[in-house]
Amino acid sequence: MGTDWVPGARLAGSRIIEAEPPADAPVVGVLALQGDVLEHLRALAEAGARPVRVRSLADLDSVDGLVIPGGESTTIGMLLDRAGMLHVLRGRAEDGMPMFGTCAGLILLSRELAQERLQHLIGVLDVTTRRNAFGRQVDSFETDLTVVGMDRAIPAVFIRAPWIERVGAEVDVLASVGDHAVLVSQGHLLAASFHPELTGDRRLHAMFVDRVRDAVGRRGAARAAR
Ligand code: GLN
């Protein structure tokens, strides 16, 4: 089972066990088939969630929300398809499970890619995304991003990053680089071109954990009303 609680201190190889998260901390999964999983687990713990790795369909049952990390979107998509998880994730997202895709994760959530090449997508976020969009000279870069609703800019690390070329009517653009959206929100879905897990700034993870907490609260209220 991938429901092991992974405190930041243990990730660093220390024997020190950090304080358990509060009992009501939402359980947030990180899709752990490929990519930068550990950094997201740590960021989520710091943002007040109980993070767990999700490697299989069974692992999905225990989570309230899911982070889809950066990595290689073609590889993650293929592994999702093989594990029979692609359609299930699409269904969960359509049923309201909060998901946060970063870099390759944004690509996987996208409904459409600007490139012709076929690859497996979860396809629930109404955007058209271009892979590796920032070009060779700026394969990787760091910049400060102004984000709608945040009083201070956030540091953002872009690594062979995609950008978003079209956003649907339901999608809010929260940050852009030049003319291109790099952070968007659509209801319970959040997606970034960059890697918020690689900086010490936890505000985006905290925003996501808040959404997961809200979704858990709404589910609880709906159950109570039945
Ligand atoms: N270039 C990768 C892709 O197309 C994404 C890069 C990343 O996640 N850092 O999937």
Image (cartoon, rainbow, N blue to C red):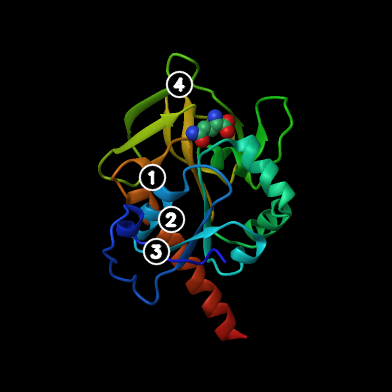
In the rendered image, which residue does mark 4 sit on? 139
Task: Residue 27 in the image: state x and y as whole percent.
Answer: 47, 67
In contact (CB < 8 Å): disc 4 and disc 2: no
Q: Which residue is mark 2?
A: 208
Residue at 72%, 25% in the rendered image: 116
Q: Secondary structure at mark 3?
A: loop
Lower sequence index among marks 4 and 3: 3
**Residue bearing the label numbered 3:** 49
Which residue corresponds to the image point at 31% horizontal and 52% vertical from the top-left?
A: 12
Question: Callout 1: helix, strand or loop?
Answer: helix
Mark 1 = which residue? 197
Query: Toward which corner of the image does residue 147 lie, by quadrant?
Result: top left
The amino acid type found where label 1 is placed reads Glu
Q: Amino acid at mark 4?
A: Asp
Q: Quadrant of residue 208?
A: bottom left
Q: Is residue 174 above or below residue 6?
A: above
Tell me: is circle 4 under 8 Å from ligand 1: no
Dot 1, how many residues are within 10 Å of its Cα: few (below 14), some (14-19), or many (20+)? many
Which numbered disc, 2 or 1, marks the residue that appears first in the sequence? 1
